[in-house]
């Protein structure tokens, strides 16, 4: 994968913006997985 500075350069955004987007994306994935697994467990 790309480093955060490489992502910032590729997208033309600042490094703090990359870190923020990565953080929000991880939270979103965590929420989606917990909802999926929770629904799976309820049957």
Image (spheres, grey):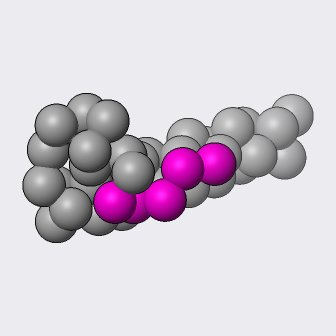
Q: Is residue 31 left or right of residue 13?
A: right
Q: Is residue 12 left or right of residue 42?
A: left
Quarter holding residue 43 = top right
**Compared to 32, does 34 lie above or below?**
below
**Compared to 36, does 16 lie above or below?**
below
| Image point (34%, 60%), residue name | 5
Magenta-drawn segment:
1-5
Q: Position of residue 23 (x, y in %)?
A: 36, 62
Give yes or no for residue 17 being in the magenta stretch.
no
Quarter holding residue 20 = bottom left
Q: Position of residue 25 (x, y in %)?
A: 41, 48
Q: Is residue 28 left or right of residue 43?
A: left
| Image point (26%, 44%), residue name | 9
Q: Which secondary structure class fits the magenta region best?
A: loop
Q: Position of residue 1 (x, y in %)?
A: 63, 48
Q: Nearer the viewer, residue 29 or 42?
A: 29
Q: How many marks overall?
A: 0
| Image point (27%, 49%), residue name | 8
Q: In this orientation, does residue 1 appear?
A: yes
Q: In this orientation, does residue 42 appear?
A: no
**Compared to 15, does 25 lie above or below?**
above
| Image point (49%, 59%), residue name | 3
Q: Nearer the viewer, residue 34 or 28?
A: 28
């Amino acid at each position: 994968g790309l480093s955060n500075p490489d992502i910032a350069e590729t997208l033309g955004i600042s490094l703090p913006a990359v870190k923020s987007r990565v953080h929000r994306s991880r939270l979103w994935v965590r929420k989606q997985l917990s909802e999926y697994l929770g629904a799976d467990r309820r049957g």
